[in-house]
Amino acid sequence: MSSIPWPFPDVRSYFSTLKQRGQNRARAWARKRQGRDPATTTLRPGRVYILPTGVGLVFGIMAFAMLLGSINYNNNLSFVLTFLLIGIGFVAMHQCQRNLVGLELTFAGADPVFAGQAMRYRVAVTNNARNARYGIRLYAPDTSSDIHDLQPGESKIFILPVPTERRGQVSLERFGVRTLFPFELFRSWAWLHMDVSGLVYPTPAEHAPQPPPTMSARGHRQHDARGEEDFAGLRRYHEGDSPRHVAWKAYARSGQLLSKQFAGADTSSQWFDFNEIDAADVEQRLSILTRWIVDSDRTLEDYGLRLPGAEFPPAHGDAHRRRCLEALALFDGGKS
């Protein structure tokens, strides 16, 4: 039996679009009203907003119905109970907004990640008041932090994970802080427009070609030039390495070919050149270079990087790795 098409437009889609437009206008209005926030911002009463939650609306309707019933039946006990509930509602509204006013928020940085991983923005939230704050949470579109309580004078780091899709400098246009304390009858929140950003490296290629051969300090390919000096460590196997220097025991354990290095042997290094990679797509080349850098860093090998307009001499270590990956993340095709 064929289904009969619904003659009316999709109501849910219509209201979803309407809600999105309203949210975008509210965000634009809030940003125009507040402007750009400094790195450390204290929430003032004028920028903390509050609205009832779904539970709060039901609570208000119930209190109003009880008030009508009390008036109709002129029952003193009903009046007492009704005004008690109304009083609880007003206290909850006051405490909900007061729970955010005076909080100090400071952007504490974000560690670089590879594209596809979540950027973990760190925000320090400090309670400088004499009363505790409860149920504090940071949030951004499609993500939020854990909920924390803050005792008087306490400061905590909130982690706000935000998915990433592309390399480069990624900025978080805005984020918010909110609370439902004390009875989840009201939702109080504030928007912040700080200069919040983090660096995203290219995604390492899953199936990258073999890197160029290792070159000795004299500028030729290394084969069996290493003597029988004292053992200094392991490095990734390269084509042309002597079978006598292959760490077969390590291969049996890990399944990865590694070669032994000996103290006093010729120092070796590699050059990773953007223009020598056989790939038409720029992003694919950057992804391959990222894979080579990550693998070489794990084996403590010296490596250099050549990009159009930039060159990094062979070295190793965390600082060298960060410089190379940062250059790949911000690469603009060699444009100055």
Image (spheres, rainbow, N blue to C red):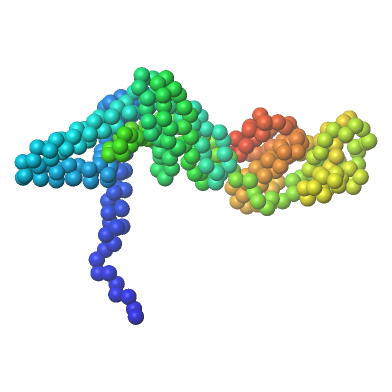
Q: Nearer the viewer, residue 250 or 205?
A: 250
Q: Nearer the viewer, residue 105 or 271?
A: 105
Coordinates of residue 11 in the picture (x, y in percent): 27, 59
Q: Which residue is at 73% across, 31% downward?
A: 315
Q: How many marks?
A: 0
Position of the N terminus, as image quadrant, is bottom left
| Relative image position of residue 123 (x, y in whole percent) | 46, 30
Q: Quadrant of residue 59?
A: top left
Q: Residue furthest right?
A: 228
Residue drawn where x is 29% and y is 58% of the image: 12
Report if residue 38 is visible in the image. no
Q: Toward which corner of the image does residue 269 lie, by quadrant? A: top right
Q: Residue at x 40, y 40 (%)?
A: 140
**Residue 305 place in picture, x, y as percent:** 69, 37
Q: Quadrant of the C terminus?
A: top right
Kindly identify the residue that appears in the image at 65 percent across and 39 percent down.
Answer: 307
Q: Is 230 drawn above or below residue 205 in the view shown?
A: above
Residue 275 falls left or right of residue 7:
right
User: Up-down: is 14 above or below 125?
Assistant: below
Indicate whether 36 appears above or below 226.
Answer: above
